[in-house]
Each structure stands twice: as structure tokens, then as C-alpha cells.
């Protein structure tokens, strides 16, 4: 997202609906029980099927834990029903809570949250739904003009909150075509790059997600017009979304959307299949 308009508070999930206190309290309890058990965020995340960034976001009240995850955590951390008892209130709060975004972005964010299909082509940076917390912070910290620390933190929080879409059921079908250069660009440094490659492998392993890499050596590229998203909201036609130099555009014209979808289909056919893409990511991770 870009700093093109004056943003208003609140910007973090659920503040406008008054559910922030519940999510924050659950996060603190989760952290307390995890630390009492002697587990790191990475170790605990592996047990419940989440990455360390997701666990960190949950413990800070930025990301809402799913009810079934909360029940599982209660058992693993020997919470004695402390977390499980909050499930009814959590389900009710989740009905009212929504992620806050800058005004110009909210029409897309709303569509994304209810999408049944999501498709992404990226050629500059890793798409937001795939980013680790450290990668997102590095991206926003280096944005020009410079953002103040408060803005950086709330944008990181918003980005992580969007990733709750992977926790939905039924889960949306997601596909990504990533230019190979994204795997090599060391945004944030070597450690951040390593964590981001691991994140791609983790999310790419989900049943509803396919990640494909477009090799740099491809000579006849069908899309030189920049990154884009395609999404299909529930019970609505597919739409497109682009963002260039601070100018976002939600594309609803059927013919324009068809042309973008056509280019995306060609790119998927030209990119490495998911299994080969995963092998390439693993190779680059080993070489770090």
C-alpha cells in the first residue's frame, strides 16, 4: 500500500468494532502458556500448523486465532480449558471484526476477504499475503518518502491480518506466478530472505495454494505491463487489481478482466510447475 492519502485511526483489526480487547487478551494468554511450556514461537507454530510470524501476530492481538487452533493450543499447552472457554466469545467477535485499511484500499480488501479464488502475478516484491513479518517491515521501512514508525507498524499489522484468509474454511483457491528474481532479491538482508523463502515453502504446501516460478531466462514473456491480482468474490464476477506508483485501480470491466486473465493463463503455462518451483526455492534456500 502507498502513502497517497491521509489515513485515519483506527488501522489495526477490530478496533472499530470494540473487539480488540478480547483478541489482545487471548494473545497474552497464548504467549504466557507457550512460554510456561518452554516453547519458542517457531516450535509452537510447528505443532499447530502456523509459521512463527503468525504466532507472533496472534500473541500481539494483530491476527485472530481460529477457534479450532485455540482448542488445540489449549490441549498442547495444558491450559486447563482457559483458551477453550473463550471460543464462543471469539466466534461472536469474529463476526463483527474486520481489518482496517486506508480508504482507497478498502474496496479491494473487502473483496479479497470474501474471495473464493485469488490469483497473483508479482515481478518486484513478494505479494503481501505471502510476506513474513520481517519482510513486510523491511519493505515499509525502505519506502520513499519515508514513513514514520507508527505508520510502519500499523501497515505491517494490516498486512499480517490479511493473511487470515488462509485460515478460512472453505479455503479460497490461490495461485501465484512469481518472477524468479523475487527469490534472489535480498530485501531486509540474508536472514529475512531465508525466512521469506521458508514462508513460501510453508504456504506453498497448503492444499489450496499453488506457487509457480517464472524463470528469468524466459524469452517471450506475455506480460510486461506489471504486477496484478485477479480475484473472484463469492457470488460475484472476477475482478482485477493493479497498483502502480501510488495509483491503485480496481478493474471491473469484463473485457479488461478477460484480457488480464488470458495473460495470466499463458504465464501459468510457461512458468515452472508447482513441484519444480518448490524444488527451485529449496535449492536457493540451501545455497544461502
Image (cartoon, rainbow, N blue to C red):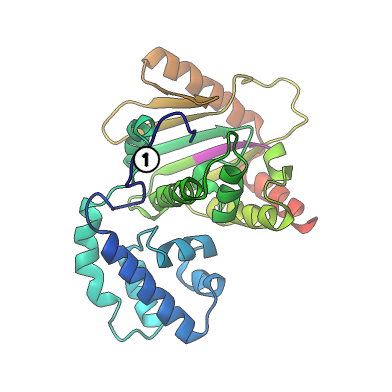
- The residue lying at 55 percent from left, 21 percent from top is 263
Residue at far right of view:
287
Quarter that holds the C terminus: bottom right
Q: Is residue 180 visible?
A: no
Residues in magenta? 175-179
Classify 132 as above or below 109: below
Residue 104 drawn at (x, y percent): 37, 29
Mark 1 neighbour class, 10 Å CA radius: few under 14, some 14 to 19, many 20 or more? many
Asked whether residue 176 is drawn in magenta, I would say: yes
Residue 158 drawn at (x, y percent): 42, 48
- The residue lying at 48 percent from left, 65 percent from top is 56
- The residue lying at 55 percent from left, 76 percent from top is 40
- The residue lying at 72 percent from left, 52 percent from top is 189
Q: Nearer the viewer, residue 167 or 205?
A: 167
Residue 276 drawn at (x, y percent): 68, 45
Classify 146 as above or below 270: below
Residue 176 drawn at (x, y percent): 55, 38
Q: Nearer the viewer, residue 196 or 71?
A: 196
Residue bearing mark 1: 101
| Secondary structure mostly seen in the magenta stretch | strand
Relative to 112, 143 lies left or right:
right
Secondary structure beneath dot 1 equals loop
Q: Is residue 214 visible?
A: yes
Relative to 119, 269 lies left or right:
right
- Mark count: 1
Q: Nearer the viewer, residue 10 or 73?
A: 10
Residue at far front of view:
148
Asked whether residue 215 is drawn in magenta, I would say: no
Classify 136 as above or below 55: above
Relative to 239, 181 lies left or right:
right
Amino acid at each position: 500500500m502507498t502513502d497517497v492519502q491521509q489515513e485515519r485511526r483506527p488501522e489495526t483489526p477490530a478496533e472499530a468494532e470494540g473487539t480488540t480487547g478480547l483478541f489482545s487478551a487471548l494473545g497474552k494468554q497464548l504467549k504466557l502458556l507457550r512460554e510456561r511450556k518452554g516453547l519458542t514461537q517457531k516450535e509452537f507454530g510447528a505443532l499447530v500448523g502456523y509459521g512463527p510470524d503468525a504466532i507472533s501476530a496472534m500473541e500481539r492481538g494483530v491476527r485472530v486465532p481460529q477457534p479450532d487452533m485455540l482448542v488445540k493450543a489449549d490441549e498442547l499447552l495444558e491450559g486447563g480449558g482457559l483458551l477453550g472457554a473463550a471460543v464462543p466469545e471469539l466466534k461472536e467477535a469474529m463476526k463483527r471484526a474486520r481489518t482496517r485499511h486506508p480508504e482507497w484500499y478498502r474496496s479491494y480488501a473487502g473483496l479479497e476477504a470474501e474471495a473464493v479464488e485469488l490469483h497473483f502475478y508479482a515481478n518486484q516484491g513478494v505479494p503481501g499475503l505471502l510476506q513474513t513479518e520481517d519482510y513486510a517491515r523491511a519493505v515499509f521501512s525502505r519506502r520513499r518518502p519515508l514513513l514514520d514508525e507508527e505508520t510502519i507498524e500499523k501497515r505491517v499489522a494490516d498486512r499480517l491480518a490479511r493473511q487470515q484468509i488462509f485460515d478460512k474454511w472453505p479455503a479460497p483457491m490461490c495461485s501465484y506466478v512469481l518472477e524468479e528474481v523475487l527469490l534472489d532479491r535480498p530485501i531486509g538482508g540474508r536472514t529475512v530472505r531465508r525466512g521469506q523463502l521458508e514462508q513460501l515453502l510453508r504456504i506453498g504446501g497448503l492444499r489450496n495454494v499453488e506457487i509457480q516460478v517464472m524463470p528469468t531466462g524466459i524469452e517471450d514473456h506475455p506480460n510486461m505491463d506489471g504486477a496484478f491480482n485477479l480475484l473472484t468474490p463469492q457470488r460475484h464476477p472476477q475482478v482485477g487489481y493493479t497498483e502502480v506508483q501510488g495509483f491503485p485501480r480496481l478493474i471491473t470491466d469484463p473485457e479488461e478482466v478477460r484480457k488480464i486473465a488470458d495473460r495470466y493463463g499463458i504465464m501459468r503455462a510457461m512458468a515452472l510447475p508447482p513441484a519444480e518451483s518448490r524444488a527451485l526455492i529449496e535449492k536457493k534456500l540451501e545455497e544461502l
